[in-house]
Image: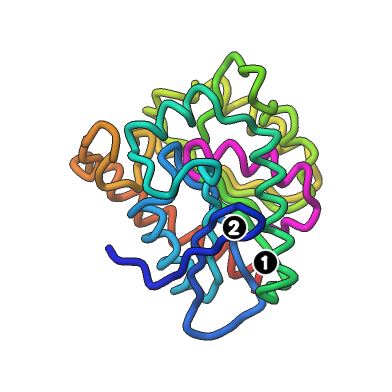
Amino acid sequence: MASAGETLTVDGLRAHLSRPGRRGKGGVLVLPTIVGIEEHMYGICEKLNDAGLLALVWDPFSAYPADTPLAQLWPIARDELDDRPAQREQMRWVGYMQRELGVENVGTIGFCLGGRMVFTLAAADPRIKAVAAYHPSIEHDCPARHLDAVALARDIACPVQVMYPGRDHITKRETFVALREALESRPAPTIAHLYPECDHGFMEHSNPISGVDRSQNPANREATRIAWAQTAAFFQACLL
């Protein structure tokens, strides 16, 4: 899938920008999976544009050349990426979306690695007006370089939507339950979806690391159809 968007470079940080056909007041900061900006993220941008929303994808690897092979980036994200400087970069893009792109209402959506980071970002940044998290990768024993997404979820002031696949091999069921309890302790709305027979990364047709075709699981295809329709409506209600 070719992206119709453009690459931005601001203060040494990279992002991918994709605009809807008609300018609106809502935009979404997309926090990608562990492999960064790739075909799946371009597809998410297209879906957001179809919903009338501007989309900007944060590049977790701005410190590295843009042509660095995936085989080198994946272990960096897995073993070295620190939430604190990453959060500062994300907040820089929120400000850019408001000041330079004219976005009045900013939401955020994340997948896998980004699915965890949307909680820590929204807890720290009150400018975020809506959060959607797809199969967030939250390890049971939080590494020192990770912010505690479950604990910080209690501080999010805006509506949150979270999608959890029952066959997630990264985030344990008890971690998801703890996340729900944290979110449901807030006065803001929480919408939690459980897809019991789905796999981690259920929206990705092909895993760029393993090559596994997740679309072979019928439950993944069904969840993709159901989940995205609700996410599009969620962002439209909160941001447009």
Q: Nearer the viewer, residue 118 or 13?
A: 13
- Characterize the local packing of mark 1: few (<14), some (14-19) or many (20 or more) Cα atoms within 10 angstroms: many
Residue stretch in magenta? 111-130
**Image height of 150 relative to 103, above or below:** above
**Image height of 130 relative to 19, above or below:** above
Residue annotated with mark 1: 97
- Main SS, magenta residues: helix
Q: Position of residue 34 (x, y in %)?
A: 45, 37
Q: Amino acid at mark 2?
A: Leu
Q: Residue at x 39, y 60 (%)?
A: 42
Q: Secondary structure at mark 1?
A: helix
Q: Nearer the viewer, residue 134 or 97?
A: 97
- The answer to which of marks 1 and 2 sits earlier in the sequence is 2
Q: Residue at x 71, y 54 (%)?
A: 92
Checking the image for residue 29, the label placed there is 2
Q: Which of pointers 1 and 2 indicates the residue nearer the eye? A: 1
Q: Are marks 1 and 2 in contact (CB under 8 Å)?
A: yes
Using the rendered image of the protein, determine whether residue 89 is visible from the camera's viewpoint: yes
Residue 128 left/right relative to 57 = right
Residue 4 left/right relative to 181 = left
Q: Amino acid at mark 1?
A: Met
